[in-house]
Image: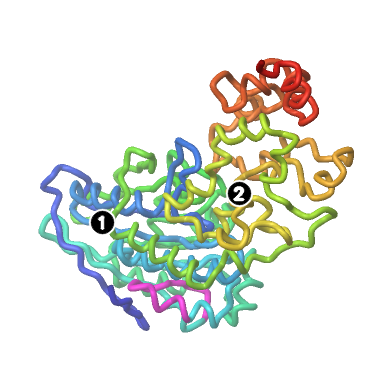
Amino acid sequence: MTPRLFIGMAAIVIAGGSACGGPDVRIFYGGDELGYLQPCGCSKPQEGGFPRRATLIDRLRKDAGATLLLERGNFISTVNAQQRIKLEVILLMLSEMGCAAAAFGGNDLDLGAASLQAVRQSASFPLVSANARSDLFVPFHITTVNVKGSSFRIGVTAVAGEQDKSKFIAAGVSVDEPIPALNDVLQTLRGQTDYRVVLANTTERVARTIAEECIGVDLIIASRGDDEPAAQPEKIGQTVIAFDGRRGKALGEVRLAVDYGRLVYAGHAVHSLGEDIVDSPAITALMAYYEEVLQAESFVEKVDRLPAAGAAFTGPSRCIGCHRWQHETWKMTNHTRSLDVLKSALRSHDPECVVCHVTALETQGGFVSDAATPDLGSVSCESCHGAAAEHVVSPESPWRRPSERECLACHTPDHSPQFVFAEYLPKIDHRRPPPRGCTGYWFFGSAAVVGFAVYTGIQKRVLRRKYRCT
């Protein structure tokens, strides 16, 4: 796959016909991915992800005369070196999916002009903006679709809102007022196109103002800040406003039909990207490339680490001496296999995933790598109870009793959608002896006091003398 750079206006011809009985034109749309490439797989069910999106789009394309994939932007969530790589990979994925045009949102612009110029080379489609003045963007893009023996030209542009103006300026991009700049572009598009789409990185209020004041806008794709796309679009005059969701958990679709030689709105759908959709092999390969880059650049090892507050970390092997049956209980939980889950999913070099699958990744003295800190490569004792070096030396020293707050740091709605503290706690509860069948059950589980007494070296010697064979 060789990325292509669009410098000026471009046109893509999509041939087809609605012989299968589906819509004449399907416009697929998304936005606000916020760095969410695919479900982490830690818990089920989880929705979303580019690999599933590609599979679904391929399936839906078979039932339409023509299709367009448009992306509103805000592909990443914050600014760091990993997010830059992530944006590059997202643009490669969208290119593989045949994206027609896209915009950058304020989050994307935070990377700065130099980084954006570099990652833009990964996009085989134009980045559009009516009011952002930079060679990063073209003012609009025109796509030609052939349906039922007729050709229709669809124009796509975008606007950046006032809320992101400072981010554009910081990235070396000047931003004009959205409404006047959009009207200038629309004046050109009205004479050259049959249908016009605006990707609005604005507030809801501005998106509605565009519908009210800008002549010739047929479709606006905007955001309400919700996780799920709006079930039904709004309509102001002749303009349809479709609101996308966040983190790519669903795919929005606007359907168009040919009516007396014109493209008209014919319906809307929101497609869930659930676990019943298999991953696209081509997009999965790009996910593997992303993981390879993270591994090659040692992102896990280079994580910024906060100074340790107090004691050092020891790993669970130092806890066994006094807490053997607690250790046996922990070994039966998913926490002990947490890093292995990431290795199976090819995500063990992604610090955004690893942080919740090891002990103290973001603290000095915590997990660094399998080779350097093998005893910390799981969610172990110190993940919940705090660094244990002081407690090992002086057992009477205090240790942290974890609360729901500690669990919720990783068991978020995105990563653990069915998490309920009261229901999950018993699965890892080691305040009581482990169930029958665990190693050491008869010694350490029948009765805690007797078990500990028998386990101590003193009691062992007493028992051997008392029951010495004759």
Residue 304: percent from the left, percent from the top? 68, 66
Which badge, 1 or 2, is on the more N-terminal residue? 1
Element carrying mark 1: strand
Picture layout, residue 305 above or below residue 20 = below
Q: Residue at x 34, y 79 (%)?
A: 9
Element carrying mark 2: loop
- Tell me the residue that label 2 is attached to: 356
Q: Specify whether 80 is left or right of 236.
A: right
The scheme the figure's colours follow is: rainbow
Return the residue nearer the eye: 282 or 248.
Answer: 282
Return the residue nearer the eye: 38 or 252.
Answer: 38
**Disc 1 residue type?**
Thr
Q: Nearer the viewer, mark 1 or mark 2?
A: 2
Classify 10 Å Cα crowding around label 2: few (below 14), some (14-19), many (20 and above): many
Q: Which of the numbered marks, if any, corresponds to residue 284?
A: none
Residue 459: percent from the left, percent from the top? 78, 24
**Disc 2 residue type?**
Cys
Q: Specify whether 241 is left or right of 15.
A: right
- Spatial CA distance of label 1 from label 2 is 39 Å
Q: Specify whether 398 is left or right of 264.
A: right
- Per the rendered image, the range of residues in magenta is 118-133
Q: Residue at x 54, y 83 (%)?
A: 114
Q: Which of the numbered marks, if any, corresponds to residue 67?
A: 1
- Residue 126 part of the magenta segment: yes
Hey, which quadrant is residue 15 in on the image? bottom left
